[in-house]
Image: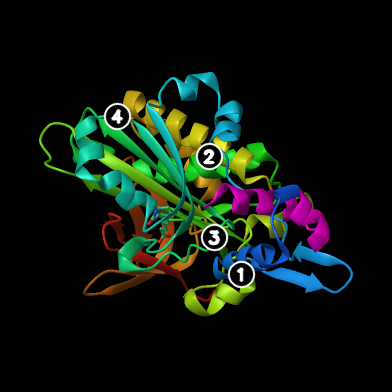
Amino acid sequence: MTETLKKLIEILQDGKFHSGEQIGKSLNITRSAIWKLMKQLSTRGLEIESVTNKGYRMSEPLILLEKEKILSLLSQKSIAQLDELDVLESIPSTNDYLLDPSKVKSKKTIACLAECQTRGKGRRGRTWVSPFAKNIYLSLLWHFKEDPSALAGLSLAIAISIIEALEMYGITQTLGVKWPNDLYCNDHKLAGILIELSGEVYDTCSAVIGLGLNVYMPKTYQDGISQPFTHLQALSTEKIDRNKIASLLLHGLIQTILVFEREGFEPFRKRWSKYDLTLGKPVSVITAGHTFEGIGRGIDQNGLFLLEDKTGTIKSFSSAEVSIRFNQT
Ligand code: BTN
């Protein structure tokens, strides 16, 4: 994005009208140059209203992500863990960006945020719809000293950390998790997590932990998304500050991983039941070849999902290629 376009967004981001003359003076550009910039904004999916005698305004006010702001809001103990923070405009996927072999081999701890993803990835091969400057797309590359078997339960711990970060931000509505790591508010999906492991796996492993959080996701995107969704802005009367949210999320992720590395899943197990949306509810567990029906009975010490079937037998499931659906009560 050019500096001029960035400045134009900064002028318009308050959601108020700004006349063409005023914009032209501030940016030192002509009316036709303004018009071209407005077109560039609409190709990024940002709606600009243009009204005679009033000027231009952005239909949805927004705050662009800024690396310096995020770092200034991030705790020192989390900054100390990070080698690099990349805040990018548009990339295919923040997870893929960090899975690049050169980044993995560097053994650096890197966090990446993007304003937009052109090939955002969800779990089970799904697409994660990622429009420009609306939401949070955040990934963290972390190098674990143990092999992947030690990471069972990590994705559940991460889900808890995200809810707690949102609570810390001031979200007071009840948030919950559908195992293993889908965040919901009132039956609508708010966020999802995709953890991908990288490279040769011997006695250590590198993981990319990707988080997609809806912040201002317009309803118009519903057609491309397979389930009902909500966004943070619907849960708050104040304008959501994506930079503050990003720093709290990053802090939550880093501190959770540190606890997980030291103590494993155990400290998160009790906290899970507070947010578990499937506990005591009729659900279906869908695997590649079969659907199992029963009642959700929480998780075991490793974070495996427990389902009680009609006969009272408890079956456990790991998260690889399994999904859970709520059934009617
Ligand atoms: C899900 O299916 O619920 C998981 C969604 C994960 C989306 C995030 S957005 C940031 C990171 N980059 C990706 O391509 N996917 C994850």
Q: Where is residue 142 drawn, in percent x and y?
A: 31, 34
Amino acid at pointer 4 = Lys
| Residue identifier under label 4 | 108
Q: Which residues are magenta?
A: 1-25
Pick the residue in front: 284 or 237. Answer: 237
| Residue identifier under label 1 | 39
Q: Circle 2 sits in a helix, a strand or a loop, which is it?
A: helix
Earlier in the chain: of badge 3 and badge 2, it is 3
Residue 18 lies in magenta, yes or no? yes
Pick the residue in front: 284 or 35. Answer: 35
Q: Circle 1 sits in a helix, a strand or a loop, which is it?
A: helix
Question: In the image, what residue occupies the spot 73% across and 57% down?
Answer: 61
Earlier in the chain: of badge 2 and badge 1, it is 1
| Residue identifier under label 3 | 132
Residue 125 lies in magenta, yes or no? no
Label number found at residue 249: 2
Q: Is residue 191 left or right of residue 11?
A: left
Amino acid at pointer 2 = Leu
Which numbered disc, 2 or 4, marks the residue closer to the eye?
4
Label number found at residue 81: none
Q: Mark 3 CB in 8 Å range of ligand 1? A: no
Using the numbered discs, state the Cα–Cα distance from disc 1 to disc 3 in whole angstroms: 14 Å
In this view, 50 is above or below 132: below
Using the numbered discs, state the Cα–Cα distance from disc 3 to disc 2 in whole angstroms: 19 Å
Amino acid at pointer 3 = Phe
Which numbered disc, 3 or 4, marks the residue closer to the eye?
3
